[in-house]
Image (tube, grey):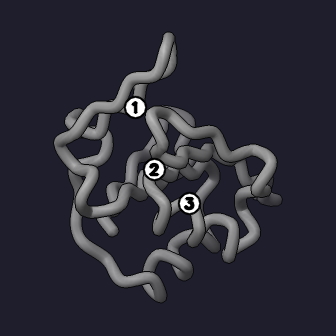
């Protein structure tokens, strides 16, 4: 999986995780679009264990692809009923509430 860490102006940490084979591709279905060709997803390859560890400290997660979304479900940051599909590609976003 490819992971990129972003920080908002407010200091919130946003984690973008995308299945490796989806990087550089774009999917469209009606008015919905997933664009994995943008810099938002272009990060570094990481193993599941390291991603699970990162999920413990982020505020927002953006997941694209079967493997990435399944990891979000496994980690408990995404509920299965909140997963959408665009042209067959699973996508989920989550806000993780943390006490500061």
| Residue at the spot 46% in from the left edge and 75% down from the top edge | 51
Q: x%, y% of residue 22?
A: 27, 51
Crowding at mark 2 (Cα within 10 Å: few <14, some 14-19, many 20+): many
Pick whichever, 19 or 88, lies toward us. Answer: 88
Q: CA distance from mark 3 to mark 2?
A: 6 Å
| Badge 2 element | strand
Crowding at mark 1 (Cα within 10 Å: few <14, some 14-19, many 20+): some
Q: Which residue is mark 3?
A: 69
Q: Which residue is mark 2?
A: 64
Q: Report if the CB atoms under discs 3 and 2 are less than 8 Å apart.
A: yes
Q: Is residue 99 left or right of residue 78?
A: right
| Residue at the spot 26% in from the left edge and 63% down from the top edge | 20
Q: CA distance from mark 3 to mark 1?
A: 14 Å
Residue 34 numbered mark, or none: 1
Instruction: State whether residue 54 is above or below residue 68.
Output: below
| Residue at the spot 62% in from the left edge and 44% down from the top edge | 93
Q: CA distance from mark 1 to mark 2?
A: 8 Å
Q: Is residue 71 left or right of residue 87?
A: right
Q: x%, y% of residue 34?
A: 40, 31
Crowding at mark 3 (Cα within 10 Å: few <14, some 14-19, many 20+): many
* Residue 5 quadrant: bottom left
| Badge 1 element | strand
Q: x%, y% of residue 74?
A: 68, 76
């Amino acid at each position: 999986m490819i992971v990129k860490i972003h920080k908002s102006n407010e200091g919130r940490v946003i984690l973008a995780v995308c299945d490796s084979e989806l990087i550089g591709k774009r999917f469209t279905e009606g008015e919905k679009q997933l664009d994995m060709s943008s810099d938002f997803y272009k990060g570094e390859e990481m193993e599941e264990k390291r991603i699970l560890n990162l999920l413990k400290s982020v505020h927002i997660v953006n997941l694209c692809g079967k493997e990435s979304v399944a990891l979000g479900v496994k980690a408990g940051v995404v509920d299965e009923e909140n997963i959408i599909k665009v042209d067959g590609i699973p996508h989920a976003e989550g806000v993780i509430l943390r006490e500061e």
